[in-house]
Image: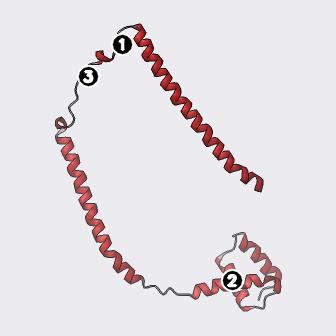
Amino acid sequence: MKNKKQIKALLERYFAGETTLAEEQTLRQYFTTEEVPPEWSAYRDLFGYFAAAETEKSTRDYASVIRQLRPRRRWLSYAAAVLLLLAATTGIYLRLAPEEQAVAQTINWEQYEPADERAAAQLLNGALKRTANTLQDGFDFTAREVRVVESIGKPLKKTK
């Protein structure tokens, strides 16, 4: 059929993913029908597996599987219709009755204002401390996560 150089070139192209279907068929045919050199015996098994897989038929009855799924599909469509109806009803209700939604109460902000400068300074000092603590917690969390990522990366660097 083909000489050894041509088959070797086809094998190199096959493992590089550059062969056409016709060339792959040629390789399959060569390794299943021809006498193969001992150094290529592993390729005989590989291409023999592909040839056996092509002739293999499924024993599963897909028609019965489809028949089993049809009732589920029907109930799923019913559920989708109910959800669509519920969403539409809710949307219509919310558009037609906006005044029945939450009635906003006016807030008397004067009760939250500090009485003098000293009270204002204490409120500001407390707010700034809470902000600083929150930022510090964020920095600490970020530092811990960076250490974890670095520790994961160390074994990978050693293996390269």
- Label 1 element class: loop
Whether residue 101 is visible to the viewer of this picture, yes or no, is yes
Residue at screen point 74% across, 82% down: 43
The correct choice, above or below, for 103 with respect to 3 in the image is: above
- Label 3 element class: loop
Residue 114 marker: 1
- The residue beneath circle 2 is 47
- The residue beneath circle 3 is 107
The correct choice, above or below, for 133 with respect to 10 in the image is: above
Amino acid type of the residue that numbered disc 3 sits on in the rendered structure = Ile
Q: Earlier in the sequence, mark 2 or mark 1?
A: 2
Q: Nearer the viewer, mark 3 or mark 2?
A: 3
Q: Residues within 10 Å of mark 3 (few under 14, many from 20)?
A: few
Whether residue 160 is visible to the viewer of this picture, yes or no, is no
Residue at screen point 82% across, 82% down: 39
The correct choice, above or below, for 59 with respect to 153 in the image is: below
Q: Nearer the viewer, mark 2 or mark 1?
A: 1
Q: Nearer the viewer, mark 1 or mark 3?
A: 1
Amino acid type of the residue that numbered disc 2 sits on in the rendered structure = Phe
Amino acid type of the residue that numbered disc 1 sits on in the rendered structure = Pro
